[in-house]
Image: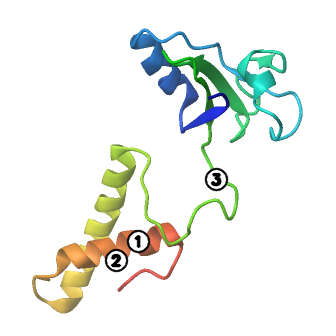
């Protein structure tokens, strides 16, 4: 198979991880035009490439390629911000442990204020945290 995509949030980190595992990976490259939307074959084999990551570091525009041991052709594509409609806004996701830890810290601080208003320990704190974090990511009003 050719033109298989592996979407990554950090192209250099993903590329380094593959190289550290002994996999031959191309140097980063990008398309000189707009968002790439064409046949994968020229990208996989180098005929339509501009060296280096996208100069403006725009999402969807930087790539690297490699072949697996079975000869399948893969494109690493860096996506740091999804285009509208590409993900469900109600999904709660984190791209790193640090991002999740930050959300937990914000929820803990807000929950502390919630418990002050209650005047007691909230036995359902885990549910409150989950609701807070999901609403925060969705851009919905936060619980009080």
State which quadrant residue 39 falls in.
top right
Image point (14%, 83%), residue name? 122
Pick the quarter of the image with the C terminus: bottom left
- How many numbered markers are drawn? 3
N-term-proximal mark, 2 vs 3: 3
Side of 85 where 117 appears, left or right: left
**In the structure shown, which secondary structural element does the residue marked by tag 2 occupy?**
helix
Label 1: which secondary element: helix
Tell me the mark number nearer the camera, choosing from 2 and 3.
3
Between 112 and 24, the one nearer to me in the picture: 24
Q: CA distance from mark 2 to mark 3?
A: 23 Å
Image point 10% across, 87% down: which residue? 120
Q: CA distance from mark 3 to mark 1?
A: 18 Å
Query: How dense is the environment of label 2, judged by Cα within 10 Å: few (below 14), some, or many (20 and up)?
Result: some
Q: Real-space Cα distance between discs 2 and 1?
A: 5 Å
User: Is the residue under label 1 in contact with that under label 3 (CB below 8 Å)?
Assistant: no
- Asked if disc 2 and disc 1 are in contact, CB closer than 8 Å, the reply is yes
Q: Is residue 73 left or right of residue 99?
A: right
Depth order, front residue of 84/23? 23
Q: Please give the name of the residue rendered at 42% of the width and 53% of the height, measured from the top-left corner.
A: 94
Whole-percent x and y of residue 24?
53, 9
Residue marked by disc 2: 131
Residue under numbered circle 1:
134
Name the mark on residue 82.
3
Residue beneath the point at 66% across and 28% down: 2
């Amino acid at each position: 198979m050719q033109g298989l995509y592996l979407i990554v949030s950090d192209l250099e980190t993903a590329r380094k991880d593959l190289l550290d595992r002994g996999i031959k990976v191309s140097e980063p490259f990008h398309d000189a035009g707009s968002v790439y939307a064409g046949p994968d074959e020229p990208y996989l084999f180098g005929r339509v490439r501009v060296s280096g990551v996208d100069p403006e570091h725009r999402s969807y525009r930087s790539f690297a390629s490699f072949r697996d041991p079975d000869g399948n052709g893969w494109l690493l594509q860096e996506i740091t911000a999804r285009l509208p409609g590409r993900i469900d806004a109600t999904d709660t996701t984190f791209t790193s442990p640090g991002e999740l830890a930050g959300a937990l810290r914000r929820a803990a601080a807000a929950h502390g204020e919630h418990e002050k208003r209650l005047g007691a320990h909230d036995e359902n704190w885990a549910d409150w945290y989950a609701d807070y974090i999901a609403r925060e990511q969705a851009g919905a009003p936060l619980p009080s």
